[in-house]
Amino acid sequence: PLGRKVLIIYAHQEPKSLNGSLKDAAVEELGKQGCSVTVSDLYAMQFEPRATRNDIVGCLHNSEEFNYGVEAREAYKRGDLSDDLIEEQKKVQEADLLIFQFPLYWFSMPAIMKGWMDRVLVEGFAHKFPDCYSSGLLKNKLALFSFTTGGSKEMYTKGSISGDIRYLLWPMQHGIMHYCGVKVLAPHICFAPEYVSEEKRKEMLLAWAQRLKALWKEEPINCSPEWYFK
Ligand code: FAD
Ligand code: ZN
């Protein structure tokens, strides 16, 4: 729909990768719909994943003993976070939907994307206890985890060697996004793109574009323990 704002947080080193193609497909399809799409291309930006005192400009709240969470929270209040963080927070603030596009690394997101979570979702901006989960500060936004794997779909089923793929979505979907009040759409998973035919990969890209056509009609998933672990 016209005017919807989408932020794609994208973590792949190679534009020609399947992740790159999935990102491009989303930019194209959402653009066609009249959405305004912004991409944070983390590797191209050389995004800093480390949470350090460099994130705080000017004086520390407590210069005797450094506490990253406290310092980030206080710096956010003063408007003293580093420019790259202020920039990302502005993009998040403006977005209706966050799409995370990445290859699965060790049952999780690549470190550069985890660093984005660690540094951008600052207390006071994204959450502020007890304003978490349904009252998290980013409520009214949606998130969608779109990722690729090395393992096949069969490996990622309950009772199989890797277990239900949903087990590993728990920290990302519930622990991070839902914690910040963001509602979660069903994940989009392309299994083992390196081990399927060129034709199958083309189908994967078409399926993603197809899903995006009807995306705004989707209801968020019930982001609860039962959904993941039943
Ligand atoms: P690519 O290799 O880039 O894509 C596959 C092929 O698609 C390429 O040949 C590319 O040219 C082609 N392609 C690109 N665009 C198109 C297009 N438009 N049409 C047709 N073909 C196209 N996997 C797991 O399952 N679990 C793990 O825990 C895990 N941990 C990992 C940890 C590390 C550190 C690393 C490096 C990998 C890990 N993996 C794991 C594997 C990883 O998830 C996969 O290698 C990755 O998801 C594949 O996605 P890609 O985009 O990199 O694929
Ligand atoms: Zn949840």
Image: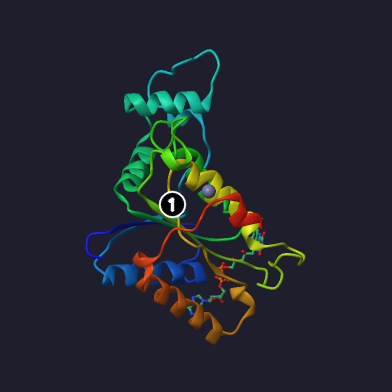
Rendered view: 192 above or below 39: below
Colouring mode (rainbow / by chain / secondary structure / one colour): rainbow
Residue 82, given in percent of the width and then of the height, sits at 38, 33
Q: Secondary structure at mark 1?
A: strand
The one nearer the camera, 151 or 59, is 151
Looking at the image, residue 76 lies above or below residue 213: above
Q: Is residue 204 left or right of residue 214?
A: right
Q: Is residue 206 visible from the viewing direction of this image?
A: yes
The residue at the point 43 percent across, 55 percent down is: 143
Q: Residue at x 60, y 72 (%)?
A: 191
Residue 108, visible in the rendered structure: no
Q: Amino acid at mark 1?
A: Lys
Answer left or right for 192 relative to 78.
right
Beta carbon of the mark 1 residue lies under 8 A of ligand 2:
no
Read off the residue under disc 1. Answer: 183
Residue 168: percent from left, percent from top: 63, 55
Image quarter hosting the C terminus:
bottom right
The one nearer the camera, 149 or 130, is 130
Q: Residue at x 60, y 60 (%)?
A: 104
Q: Is residue 56 above or below residue 89?
A: above
Q: Residue at x 62, y 59 (%)?
A: 166
User: Seen from this angle, which residue lies furthest top?
Assistant: 64
Most distant residue in the bottom direction? 199
Front-most of residues 225 and 88: 225
Q: Residues within 10 Å of mark 1 (few under 14, many from 20)?
A: many
State the quadrant of the N terminus.
bottom left
Number of callouts in the render?
1
Q: Position of residue 83 (x, y in %)?
A: 35, 37
